[in-house]
Amino acid sequence: MTQPQPEPIDSAQLQQLAAATMAQARFPMLATIDGDQPRLRPVSPVKTDGFTVYVANLRQYAKTQQIAANPKVELCYLDDHHNQVRITGVASVVTDRAVLEEIWNSNPLLRQYLGSLDNPALVVYRIDPVQVRYMKEWALEYHDVPLK
């Protein structure tokens, strides 16, 4: 059996390809570190600004302590065509009231579940990208996506 040959990728299209993959995949997996053990779970971003991703969390979840101990995280988006976007970044707690209100007002599920933006159980993380990589289906080669 011959190995499939991936089509070449135009580097000028990387940002667009990565953004399209993220939009189609919608629910990335978030990796954190728990001591010396990686932990992975699906998350539902509440806001995306380019490659900066915001994730809501409940304070009692284990990822709260994991991110507090080590804010280095990675998100992996995988679309229906097996294209991947991996965002290696640093998570920080969002405290800007205007940003929190924008997220709150655009997410009815948060409002229904938590009742108030001031619910102490709510934590919103901003994941700032350090590196973004894109891989076309089974190409076995990542391409660095420009952050600007």
Image (cartoon, helix red, strand yellow):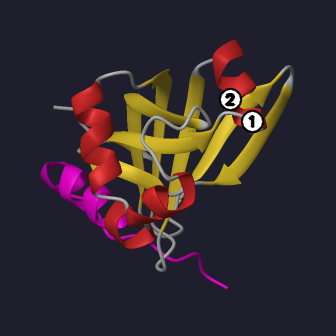
7 above or below 133?
A: below
**Residue in the picture at 65% in, 17% down:** 68
Which mark, residue 64? 2
Picture quarter with the N terminus: bottom right
Picture quarter with the C terminus: top left
In the rendered image, residue 16, in percent from the top left (x then y), is placed at 19, 58
Q: Are marks 1 and 2 in contact (CB under 8 Å)?
A: yes
What's the residue type where badge 2 is placed?
Thr
Q: Residues within 10 Å of mark 1 (few under 14, many from 20)?
A: few
In the rendered image, residue 39, in percent from the top left (x then y), is placed at 78, 40
The answer to whether residue 64 is seen in the rendering is yes
Q: Is residue 48 left or right of residue 93?
A: left
Q: Quadrant of residue 67?
A: top right
Viewer-proximal residue among 12 and 84: 84
Which mark, residue 33? none
Q: Name the residue tied to disc 1.
A: 60
Residue 87 magenta-highlighted: no
The Cα–Cα distance between marks 1 and 2, rounded to whole angstroms, is 7 Å
What's the residue type where badge 1 is placed?
Gln
Viewer-proximal residue among 83 and 75: 75
Start-end of magenta stretch: 1-21
133 above or below 110?
A: above
The answer to whether residue 130 is seen in the rendering is no
Mark in the foreground, 1 or 2:
1
